[in-house]
Image (tube, rainbow, N blue to C red):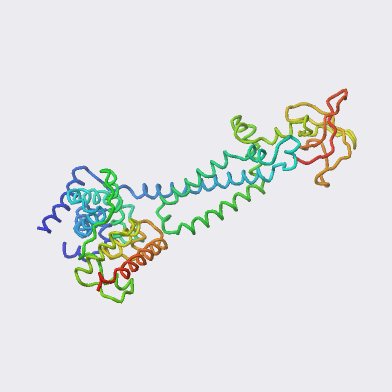
Amino acid sequence: MEENIIEKSDQELVRLSLKNKEFYGFLIQKYQDKLKRYILRISGGVYNDADDILQDVFIKVYKNLNDYDPSLKFSSWIYRITHNETISFLRKINRKPTTYNFEIDAVKVKTIEEDLTLDQKLDNAKVKENLLKIISNLDKKYQDVVLLRYSEDKDYQEISDILKKPQGTVATLLRQAKSQLKEEIVKNKHLFS
Amino acid sequence: MQEENNKDISKKVLDKIECDKICPTAKWCFVCKNYAFWVVAILSGLIVSLALSLMVFFFMDQDWGVYQLQGENIASHILVFTPYLWIIVFLLFILLIVYSFNKTKEGYKISHLKSAEIGALIIIVVALACVFAGISAIIDDSFHKRLPMYNSVIFDKHSTWNDPQNGLLGGEVTGVENSERFFLKDFKNKNWNVEKENLIIIPETFILKTGEKIKMIGRICNPCPVRTFIVNTIKPW
């Protein structure tokens, strides 16, 4: 059964989970690593609570399976719930992450290079580290979209669905973030050569 | 180790679902919830349109030429008749529209600017339709008649025209005796003989007849044996 299930789309797994909750286990397995990483990134690293948040996310997703709109990607929908649950959790414990927890290996440097149309390559570890410092200093509103674009590898439509912001707003935020990033990279050229 | 941990979370969640007998909420609940937000947004839109139509109605229905007769200046006149209640209703329900629209499943997909433009256009069109169809006048009138509180928060035009001492009198024509004289019952149910003097009727096409509600500028006849008003300007109510 497991081999057949792996080939099934998220939509099919949702449909099957509604009939038999055992199928929901496959959805959990498919998303738990990605979502846990995402929780750790947006919470600034609540390592002790990440599993609890993740468990709450999956319970909430299960309760709301009938609310899933197949016109969205399932991953966008589950990321949205994860984002909201994590923010609620942080609010509950009176903690506000000032910066997100970007990891060097998770940042899609290639996408940044392409999006920013940079002359120089951002491929060595030291350069990446400097890039992360710049990203971490961006405004929080930019970090949301930058993280989804360059760490989670989401496109504009997915970011719009996850953050429940119009696509135009997402595009504007990303454009402004990219322009700030580019400005900082150009200003600190010596750190990126 | 990682795989074990994965299975562990999956098992934990499934066990909790089993143990707490958690079931997915029925689809109709979500459909109803989404519709409810749309209904609230649309109803709030209607209320905002009505509030706007009443504000427009107040400005259009104001007798801009008579405040001087009552010894007021334009600023104090505006302060008195500004419909604060409707302005507050307007602003509160705008917030409710924004809130409920954002809560709908589809709301976030439309840009803020576009939704604001479309919303504003619909609200303005409905508001103007209400003004020109007379709906705002009917609402204002019925609120004045039925809600005593309303009179204390919204300026009542009747009070302006219940001021014969300052030459302002309004009411319903109860009979026309001849071309020089007619009878009127004012808004405090007092009967008046009205005599014309260098009369101007605005608009000229207006025909004075029994049952018509009018407003007049003139003066109290003093001394006259019965309650008499000498009128020189008549306008339909």
Vertical arrangement, residue B109 with respect to residue A193, above or below? above
Please tell me how many numbered marks the rendered image carries: 0
The image shows residue B157 at horizontal and vertical percentages of 69, 36
Q: Quadrant of residue A134?
A: bottom left
The image shows residue B81 at horizontal and vertical percentages of 64, 38
Q: Quadrant of residue B193?
A: top right
Vertical arrangement, residue A189 with respect to residue A53, above or below? below
The image shows residue B144 at horizontal and vertical percentages of 64, 34
Identify which residue is drawn at 60% across, 49% down: B127
Along the viewing direction, whichever of B218 and B41 lies nearer the viewer: B218
In this picture, residue B133 sits left or right of residue A69: right
In this picture, residue B139 sits left or right of residue B222: left
In this picture, residue B214 sits left or right of residue B90: right
- Quadrant of the snapshot with the N terminus of chain A: bottom left
Identify which residue is drawn at 66% across, 48% down: B133
Identify which residue is drawn at 60% across, 53% down: B125
Residue located farthest toward the bottom when viewing the structure as drawn: A119
